[in-house]
Image (spheres, grey):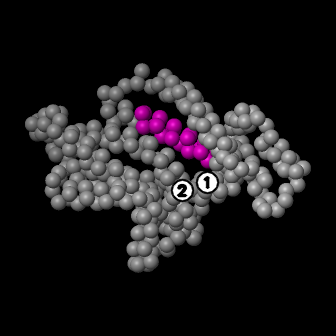
Amino acid sequence: MGRYVARRLLQMIPVFLGTTLLIFLMVYALPGDPVRAMWGDKAADPAQLAAIKHQLGLDQPLWKQYWDYISNLAHFDFGMTMSGRKVTDVMSEALPVTVRLSLMAFGIEVVLGILLGVLSGLRRNKLMDKLVLVITLLVISVPIFVLAYVFQAVFADGLGWVKPTVQDSMDLGQLMLPAIVLGSLSLAYVARLSRTSIVENLRADYIRTAVAKGLPRRRIIVRHLLRNSLIPVVTFLGTDLGTLMGGAIVTEGIFNVQGVGNALYRAINGKEGATVVGFVTVLVVVYLLSSLIVDLLYAVLDPRIRYA
């Protein structure tokens, strides 16, 4: 197992470098001068322009800028914003909010998604199964921003249970509605994936053998059926945590959550290359670590899987 983890960590290095280089090139290939944009419509002093570009390293060749960026990452230095703030300071304000929002959405999709999927699979073709299939199909078919506005209209404007937008991004109660919206699409996928896996495994020989041996139904479901059926679900959940953090951009914008989504939106509009690349770098690391954890969980769920 140790050798497998070490090999996977080494494999992450070229993936990380390739991904960050691609993002770096895309961001810095955008048209327009981000430093000149600080003056707006006013005339800019060429000397001041050159000084700020030199201070931010923007007068260096692109390969030199990327090398400096990667080198500074070893010291957790993500560079400076155009306003002179450290990107790490911007991250320290936005990341905790988005992590909290994503974890709430992740918890909702795991608990409700697996529960609905298992109940639907065990009651195949019954009313419960048909309701789950129809509702999840409806959620999958509706764009996330439409779902957000519907939830605001029903639960905030109509019923008055919650506020339509978040006033305090650290308040877990106010984050509940955007978390439900953010996790709803993944919840639907988890429910359908769990249901399909449960139905397929119910026909497997090892389940028929367990039934023929007279094992209690609860033991068959918990120790045999769920253990094998959750493997594809875990694969989806592992990659989905990173997707939730990236997908929070739309949800945070609609609900005024001051997290990564809002920070990225402002950074893209202001052509803050260092801020954009910094946040995307963190999201790439989250994706890679999630993928590693998923692979390790395989051995826990299915003891037949062993890593050399």
Q: Is residue 283 found inside the magenta-colored segment of the image?
A: yes
Assess whether mark 1 and mark 2 are in contact (beta carbons under 8 angstroms): yes
Mark 1 element type: helix
Residue appearing at x 88%, y 54% in the figure:
45
Question: What residue lies at 15% left-to-right and 44% top-to-bottom?
Answer: 216
Query: Is residue 198 in the magenta section?
Result: no
Outermost residue toward the top?
308
Q: Nearer the viewer, residue 39 or 96?
A: 39
Q: Secondary structure at mark 2?
A: helix
> What is the distance, in whole Å, between disc 2 and disc 1 at their CAs?
8 Å
Amino acid type, mark 1 = Leu
**Residue placed under numbered mark 2 in the picture:** 249
Residue positioned 12% across, 39% down in the render:
211
Q: Residues within 10 Å of mark 1 (few under 14, many from 20)?
A: many
Compared across the picture, whether 222 is left or right of 279 comes to left
Report the residue marked by disc 1.
Answer: 264
Q: Is residue 262 above or below residue 192?
A: below
How many numbered dots are placed on residues in this image? 2
Q: Amino acid at mark 2?
A: Ile
Q: Position of residue 186 (x, y in %)?
A: 39, 52
Question: Does residue 68 show up?
Answer: no
- Magenta residue span: 277-296
